[in-house]
């Protein structure tokens, strides 16, 4: 049916080429159904212009649906003026997807076979989280964007098959997380537990962590948890095995570098 992007930071197309090869990456760009942008911080939307320009050069027939905060509309309008042509795009404000009774709510099931629902999250003005529900295969994916713990996200993400949640800071840094409107690892896990997510993928770790951040939690809880990394691919058929990657990654990238022995 096609594919979608949830957030599109600078370098997104380059990462697609590295992961898929140039030919398949271009095929994915052409087959994009929609791109959803959580908020207007550059690390979440700056790669969108490259994707749009690629679609123009490839003469993609179907207009790309771009969903995001209202401020994104003006930013894209300025881009259209610069390129001086039709960028083959339909813009939808995320605020119009908060209530399931709103007219636009039926657009995505009818055209793409998925249901979308957004909610405002606790970050900057016009920051949103999203839930994508597949009408055909009946999975449900919740993505937090950037946020503090958010009860509205729990509500719309209830019983998600996969919850992808930001975990910018390690436990013990709750004050900094509150000041910067992000989550610690335990705060993110608490939210995903509340929504009864089948599997949780933690992401958006601070660049201060060159290795896997230290995750302190019960063994039972970690049976549902994995961490995101560049080029991670998750097949729904492999969800049962997904949490097994966490101890492997922790062993491969230990939190503490080994001490060199004398004489070596």
Image (tube, rainbow, N blue to C red):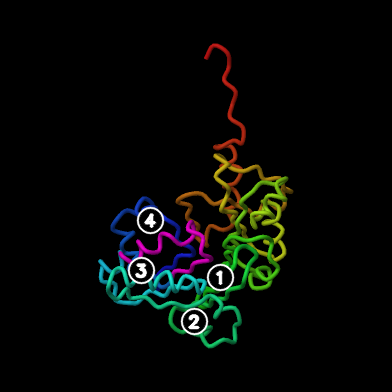
Say whether disc 1 or disc 2 marks the residue closer to the N-terminus: 2
Label 1, label 4: how many angstroms apart (C-alpha)? 24 Å
Label 3, label 4: how many angstroms apart (C-alpha)? 23 Å
Q: Are marks 4 and 2 in contact (CB under 8 Å)?
A: no
Task: List the residue tagged with mark 4.
Answer: 16
Mark 1, Cα crowd under 10 Å, few <14 / some 14-19 / many 20+, is: some
Q: Nearer the viewer, mark 1 or mark 4?
A: 4
Say whether disc 4 or disc 2 marks the residue closer to the N-terminus: 4
Element class at badge 2: helix
Q: Magenta stretch?
A: 35-53
Q: Are marks 3 and 4 in contact (CB under 8 Å)?
A: no
x and y, in percent, of residue 2 in the image: 39, 71
Label 1, label 3: how many angstroms apart (C-alpha)? 35 Å
Does residue 188 sit above or below 115 in this rendering?
above
Residue at 36% over, 68% down: 79
Q: Are marks 1 and 3 in contact (CB under 8 Å)?
A: no
Q: Is residue 257 magenta?
A: no
Q: Nearer the viewer, mark 3 or mark 4?
A: 3
Q: Are marks 2 and 3 in contact (CB under 8 Å)?
A: no
x and y, in percent, of residue 107 in the image: 48, 84
Element class at badge 3: helix
Task: List the residue tagged with mark 3.
Answer: 79
Residue at 30% over, 64% down: 54
Task: List the residue tagged with mark 2.
Answer: 109
Q: Quadrant of residue 239?
A: bottom right
Say whether disc 2 or disc 3 marks the residue closer to the N-terminus: 3
Say whether disc 1 or disc 4 marks the residue closer to the N-terminus: 4
């Amino acid at each position: 049916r096609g594919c979608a992007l949830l957030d599109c930071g600078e370098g997104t197309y380059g990462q697609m080429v590295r992961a898929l090869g140039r030919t398949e990456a271009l095929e994915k760009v052409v087959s994009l159904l929609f791109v959803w942008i959580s908020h207007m911080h550059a690390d979440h939307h700056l790669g969108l212009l490259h994707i749009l320009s690629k679609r123009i050069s490839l003469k993609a027939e179907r207009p790309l649906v771009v969903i995001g905060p209202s401020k994104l509309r003006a930013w894209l309008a300025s881009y259209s003026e610069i390129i001086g042509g039709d960028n083959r795009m339909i813009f939808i404000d995320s605020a119009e997807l908060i209530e399931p009774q709103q007219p636009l709510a039926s657009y995505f099931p009818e055209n793409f076979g998925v249901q979308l629902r957004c909610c405002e999250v606790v970050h900057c003005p016009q920051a949103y989280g999203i839930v994508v529900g597949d009408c055909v295969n009946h999975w449900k994916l919740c993505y937090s964007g950037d946020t503090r713990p958010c009860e509205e996200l729990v509500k719309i993400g209830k019983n998600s098959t996969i919850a992808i949640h930001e975990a910018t800071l390690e436990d013990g840094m709750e004050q900094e997380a509150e000041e910067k409107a992000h989550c610690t690892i335990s705060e993110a896990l608490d939210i995903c537990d509340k929504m009864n997510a089948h599997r949780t993928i933690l992401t958006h770790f601070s660049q201060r962590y060159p290795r896997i951040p230290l995750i302190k939690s019960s063994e039972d809880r970690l049976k549902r948890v994995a961490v995101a990394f560049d080029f991670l691919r998750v097949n729904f058929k492999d969800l049962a095995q997904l949490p097994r990657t966490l101890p492997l990654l922790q062993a491969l990238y230990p939190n503490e570098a080994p001490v060199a022995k004398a004489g070596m």
